Amino acid sequence: LFVQDVIDTGRNLVVANKNEFVIDRSADLGIMISDATKLRQSVLNLLSNAGKFTKGGRITLHVSRHKRQAGDWIRISVEDTGIGISPENVQKLFQNFKQAEASTASRYGGTGLGLALSQSLCRLMGGTISVESVLGRGSRFTIDLPAYIEDSQAAARAPSMPHGEAFSHAV
Ligand SMILES: Nc1ncnc2c1ncn2[C@@H]1O[C@H](COP(=O)(O)OP(=O)(O)O)[C@@H](O)[C@H]1O
Ligand SMILES: [Mg+2]
């Protein structure tokens, strides 16, 4: 299962800072046809950030399926109880090389490329990535994707899925 694979890999990223890892997965996830490589990379980037910016807290991976008029969508969100992000900085997060605070690189390392990459990957799959955060309280990053990549405009934008393999199996 795709989610189980992400959980197994992501667990190490999350528990490194003594964080608890909680999985909230709805029972009706069903089948997804998407690009496994891109999706995996995007979710692991979010889990890596959550693990890095949260110490002794809780990180929750939510996965659910939603019916929309144009077809089913899958929502994957990563919620943490970490340092959070101020409203001014939330807007800039998805830019290349952008870190929320000037001091982030020296305190936490990183390049500021992870979220920009995740956003590009999600767009290629016809989806979106969004964030809600409260400074000092925590953050929640949400990926919304069509469950079947051909059902969406994504097929036009990523006709041959050049950098990854399509997968079709249980989420
Ligand atoms: N879960 C999070 N909690 C707090 N801040 C975050 C979180 N995820 C990302 N950020 C902020 O967004 C910036 C950009 O994230 P990212 O593109 O992954 O870069 P990097 O991890 O290399 O710093 C981070 O530097 C950090 O300031
Ligand atoms: Mg990162």
Image (cartoon, rainbow, N blue to C red):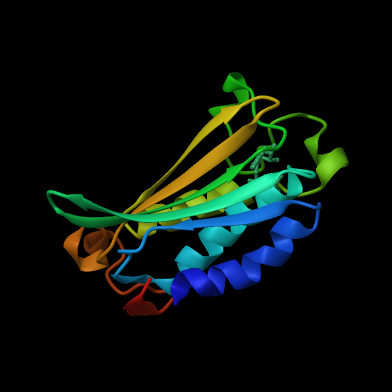
Task: Name the residue nearer the viewer: 61 or 157.
Answer: 61
Q: In this figure, what is the number of numbered marks?
A: 0
Q: Residue lying furthest top in this view?
A: 88
Q: Which quadrant of the figure has residue 8?
A: bottom right
Q: Residue at x 51, y 67 (%)?
A: 40
Task: Name the residue nearer the viewer: 154 or 87.
Answer: 87
Which quadrant of the rendered structure holds the N terminus? bottom left
Place of residue 91 in the rendered image (x, y in percent of width and height, measured from the top left)? 53, 28
Place of residue 4 in the rendered image (x, y in percent of width and height, measured from the top left)? 52, 72
Ligand 1's quadrant: top right
Decide if residue 26 is on the left or right side of residue 39. left
Place of residue 27 in the rendered image (x, y in percent of width and height, measured from the top left)? 35, 63
Q: Residue at x 48, y 69 (%)?
A: 3
Query: Is 120 located above or below residue 4 in the figure?
Result: above
Place of residue 170 in the rendered image (x, y in percent of width and height, measured from the top left)? 35, 76
Query: Is 99 located above or below residue 71 in the figure?
Result: above
Query: Is 22 located above or below residue 140 in the figure?
Result: below
Q: Which quadrant of the figure has residue 88?
A: top right
Can residue 91 be seen in this snapshot? yes
Q: Residue lying furthest left in this view?
A: 69
Q: Residue at x 34, y 52 (%)?
A: 127
Q: Residue lying furthest front in this view?
A: 27
Can residue 163 be seen in this snapshot? no
Decide if residue 39 is on the left or right side of residue 32. right
Which quadrant of the rendered structure holds the C terminus? bottom left
Q: Residue at x 28, y 63 (%)?
A: 147
Task: Name the residue nearer the viewer: 162 or 125.
Answer: 125
Decide if residue 17 is on the left or right side of residue 162. right
